[in-house]
Image (cartoon, rainbow, N blue to C red):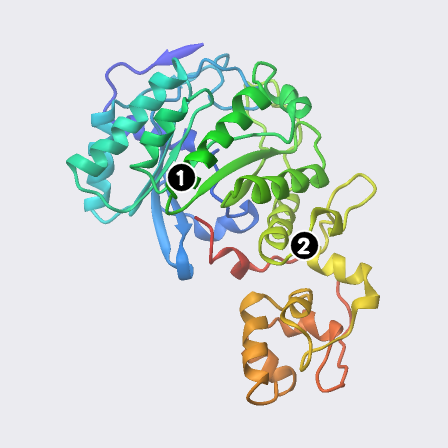
Amino acid sequence: MAVYIKKPEPSQKLRVLGVGAKFDVSGYPSLLSAKRKMRFGFIYPAVGKGGRLIPLLKVLQSNACMGNCYYCANRQGRDFRRVKFSPSEMAKLFIRYYEGGVVKGLFLSSAISARPTQVEEEMLETVRLVREKYGFRGYVHLKILPGTEEDLIAEAAKFADRLSINLEAPNQTYLSRLSPFKDYSGQLLRGLERIARVHRESPLKAGVTTQLVVGPSGESDRELMELSHKLYKGLGLWRVYYSGFTPLKDTPFEGLPPCSKWREARLYQADFLLRRYGFTPSELPYDGEGNLPQDMDPKLGWALAHPERFPVEVETASFEELLRVPGIGRISAQRIVNLRRKEGIGGLEGLKRMGAVVKRARNFITIKGKFSPSPQKGEKEVDEQLFLWEEL
């Protein structure tokens, strides 16, 4: 049932629509996000190049939706307050927060309250006002709604740094369990292909992204990783984001268990292995049900499953071989390759100074033939630095 607020103030609308926007994730696992909460629920602390904090005003243009997705806070059949910003209201409010130094960027999405084209045009008008009337030149992420035509997407690309559309699931079978009225291939995937095509013709500064809902439809991690790999290779996506399911009252899925925060975190780690470390989905360590282990990161899981590849001699290993060592990332691997041309690594302490996580790496390497392992621990951990360099 729709319950509209009578003549709400913009600040009232923002409180409602900011909460509604939190379900569009931007890449930081919920396992770590508690460390980075900000004063207002509608301000999201994204991280940009070099670890620089970029607080975004993350908000919906409207939370009134014609759809009835089983998991969604904004579903038509749910009883809650429905409000909407006009383009002029939204643009003016954002600029007020920007000029006050509270935010540095905008992440604008919307529920589908009318024809997708009509709603998309209203969001685009908001961004156009922000750019042309108020002269804002900072970061803007604009959500593209299913059913938006390519010419409108091309127009949106002139004003946004990033465009995205949510696929939600790896295929139609799983999507039907989340939302029986959505068309995966003809609506969602085609929309993503349209955005990717526009991006190829006129590159966006922060590329194209999508989001997957993890948990309630019963998909496996293997299926999610195979889809992500296909999207990276075929459409050139910048990122795939994984939104761990949280049950909400007054929805058909309110009785389902939430997605494990560790599952969400391991998916992000595995995603990094696909995008940045040369892994393929088939190489990742899955259990009998096709899911990643939650008690260790997938890179460690792969290494333990391939003892024939170790130990690696740090003084002579290729850059690609070093990348496969748990505890050695791209930056530390490059530092090792550069330094050893001039001088020795300097043992485990030297390796630590180059940024390697020695407590993980030492079990898989030798340095000038010397092997210095430590007792293997199966502790749960997530390297936060992995997420601090390319979240946006």
**Residue 364 vertical placement versus 190 (above, below):** below
Is residue 204 shown left or right of residue 125? right
- Is residue 141 visible to the viewer in this orientation of the structure? yes
Q: Nearer the viewer, mark 2 or mark 1?
A: 1
**Residue 171 vertical placement versus 267 (above, below):** above
Marks 2 and 1 in Cβ contact (< 8 Å)? no
Quarter of the rendering containing residue 308: bottom right
Name the secondary structure under disc 2.
Answer: loop
**Residue 126 vertical placement versus 291 (above, below):** above
Is residue 46 shown left or right of residue 350? left
Q: Which residue is mark 1?
A: 201
x, y (%) of residue 90?
25, 29
Measure the C-alpha gap from mark 2 to mark 1. Answer: 28 Å
Is residue 241 shown left or right of residue 92? right
Q: Residues within 10 Å of mark 1 (few under 14, many from 20)?
A: few
Q: Residue at x 61, y 30 (%)?
A: 169
* Residue occupying the far bottom of the picture: 343
Residue 291 is labelled as none
Query: What is the three-letter code of the residue carrying label 2?
Result: Phe
Name the secondary structure under disc 1.
Answer: helix
x, y (%) of residue 371?
77, 82
* Residue occupying the far top of the picture: 1
Q: Residue at x 41, y 35 (%)?
A: 198
Q: Which residue is mark 2?
A: 279
Q: Residue at x 78, y 71 (%)?
A: 310
